Image (tube, rainbow, N blue to C red):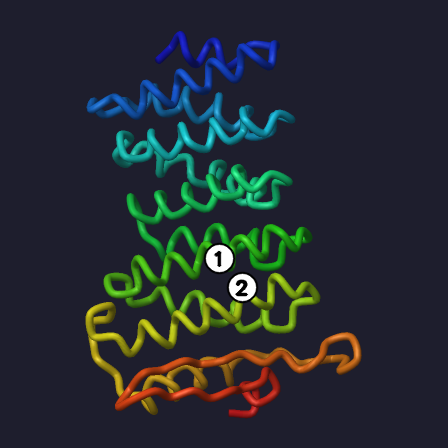
Amino acid sequence: MEEALELARAKDTKERMAGVERLHQLLEASRKNLSSSEVTSLVDVCLDLLKDNNFRVSQGALLALASAAVLSGDHLKLHFNAVVPAIVERLGDGKQPVRDASRRLLLTLMEISSPTLIVERAGSYAWTHKSWRVREEFARTVTSAIGLFASTELPLQRAILPPILQMLNDSNPGVRDGAISCIEVVILISKNPQLSHRHFGLKTAQKRCLRLASNIRFQITSTAANPRLNFTLHRHFDGSFHKRFCAEDLVQL
């Protein structure tokens, strides 16, 4: 692995690409846990590669970190303060493969540690990030996280709902759509007995969601600039149920 790391540090772009690809291949094929020093070396190199102008290099660094995460035990957790913000920045990359790799890496970190912890750490940078693309991709990330972890991580929805509801007032339509999708999944997961610890009835699930919403102080400040932001809560309880709420209604309930 040391040779691959050295190649990934090269000044030549093609050599860096070859180095990061080799590094990913080695980590994918390895069944041996990484030592603390190996994780530190890997993180140091990958943090530099994430800033690379070549998207294939930064994408490769994200893939390498994802492969290393399952081999690092608790060692990688010591670097979360540096790694998580760097991943969040790549959510705003101009290339979709890099954004996809960033989302997958965040989900991998949730698997090896705590979903709620990663959402809170990444969210401190992502929820109100100046780049709309970061905000949109993070909304997609937490939507996936709810689907994957909500049944085993009870605090996750409570950590996600307040900032997601704030996103309903985002100036970017893509961010608003991401928030809508996330809220729909929250409601569906809270009902489905196969995906949640408890089976809530329709009214109970809605009340819990709306009770959280009522605690959020957000307003539609300009009807012209921010038209009513509708989102749909889909439920299937004793048949199909379909009702629309708007952001103003959420505040009042």
**Relative horizontal placement of residue 17, taking residue 229 as reference (left or right):** left
- The answer to whether marks 2 and 1 mark residues whose Cβ atoms lie closer than 8 Å is yes
Say what amino acid the circle numbered 2 marks.
Answer: Gly
Disc 2 element: helix
What residue is pinned by disc 2?
178
**Alpha-carbon distance for marks 2 and 1?**
6 Å
When the figure is inspected, residue 84 is found, relative to residue 71, above or below; the finding is: below
Where is the N terminus found, in terms of image quarters? top left
Q: Residue at x 54, y 53 (%)?
A: 137
Residue 222 position within the rendered picture, expressed as x and y whole percent measured from the top left: 77, 80
Say what amino acid the circle numbered 1 marks.
Answer: Arg
Q: Residue at x 42, y 31 (%)?
A: 63
Tell me which numbered mark, 2 or 1, is placed earlier along the sequence.
1
Task: In the displayed orientation, state which residue is furthest to the front.
Answer: 239
Q: Residues within 10 Å of mark 1 (few under 14, many from 20)?
A: some
Residue 13 position within the rendered picture, expressed as x and y whole percent measured from the top left: 60, 14
Picture disc at residue 140? 1
Task: Indicate the quadrant where residue 146 lies.
Answer: bottom left
